[in-house]
Amino acid sequence: MTLTMIDADEALFKLAHLADACEQSWSLTADEVEERVLFFCDASVEAAQNIARAAKRLAMDDNLLADWSLAMRAADAIGMALRCDRKSVRLYTQYWEAIVDRVKSGIHTPYPLYCGFKSLPGGVVRRDEYIAFPAAQSALFWPPMAKSFAEFGLDESEGERVFSGLSASNAIFTLTSGNGRKSWLTTVRRADINRVELAKWLAPLADRPGGAAILEAARSNSLVHLAGGTDDVKGAFLTVYFEIDVETLLSRLS
């Protein structure tokens, strides 16, 4: 193991124990599955320093890291996602409190919830803005979700039943468009998603790479987000995110 890898492992270990939440995700495309872990922290100097240290040791683009540092000044939370094979690093900023303040003032227009600063395989860098639609009705969030589900062999009508608890009051819906990407992300952690029914609905994924691990996560962990859409490089994709503990996160990186 190289010194750089050892330094990165040390930084990730510190970051994992500092994180306020950890997630594991699988992003499916027609040809492969990308497994990632995510560290999520309330915005603080210590968290920012640890994320930046880990990102630098993972050879993140310096300009991208500088842009994240600038965007972080107005953020209430920050995070880092890492492919388990370490071929990509993604930094995030969140502006949830700004949206809450706007809604309390009677402003329900779309507003950025997340910004993503992504160092992808092949030296590609991308900056994505996730635009939230406060109190989005199902007529807005369900059609793109159903389309992505169908593209990956998941039954739309059964999915509608599994996610029947999603509503304007508990679904946080964002759209991202531009830079060769058109996608959606729905946060479902506030809804009461039945794990048994979720795993049964996801069963068609079992024969895909990573499918067995996805089904196990669905049975044993809380579903946090779903995302999907199209990407110029990946084509159509569907991503599922589950909450995990620190020990599981570190084991996925070992």
Image: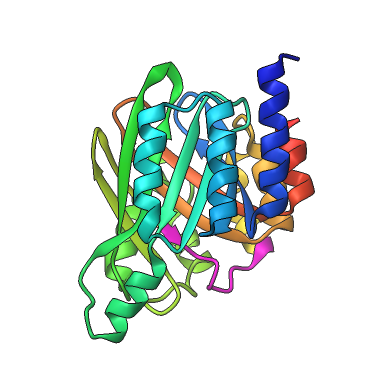
What secondary structure predominates along the stretch shown in magenta? Answer: loop
The answer to whether 138 is drawn above or below residue 46 in the figure is below
Figure quadrant of the C terminus: top right
118 or 54, nearer to the observer = 54
Please indicate whether residue 129 sits to the left or right of residue 96 in the image.
Answer: left
Q: Can residue 149 be seen in this view?
A: yes
Q: How many marks?
A: 0
Please indicate whether residue 170 sits to the left or right of residue 136 in the image.
Answer: right
The answer to whether 29 is drawn above or below residue 79 in the figure is above
- Please provide the residue range marked out in magenta: 186-196
Q: Which residue is drawn at 20% across and 71% down?
A: 109
Figure quadrant of the N terminus: top right
> Residue 174: horizontal and vertical position, in percent?
33, 58
Q: Which residue is drawn at 74% across and 54% down?
A: 245
18 or 151, nearer to the observer = 18
Q: Which residue is drawn at 34% across and 71% down?
A: 98
Q: Can residue 146 be seen in this view?
A: no
> Residue 143: horizontal and vertical position, in percent?
30, 58
Report if residue 24 lies within the magenta region: no
> Residue 175: horizontal and vertical position, in percent?
29, 54
- Here the colouring is rainbow
Report if residue 190 lies within the magenta region: yes
To which quarter of the image does residue 142 belong? Answer: bottom left
The answer to whether 196 is drawn above or below residue 69 in the figure is below
> Residue 73: horizontal and vertical position, in percent?
38, 56
Please indicate whether residue 107 sits to the left or right of residue 91 in the image.
Answer: left
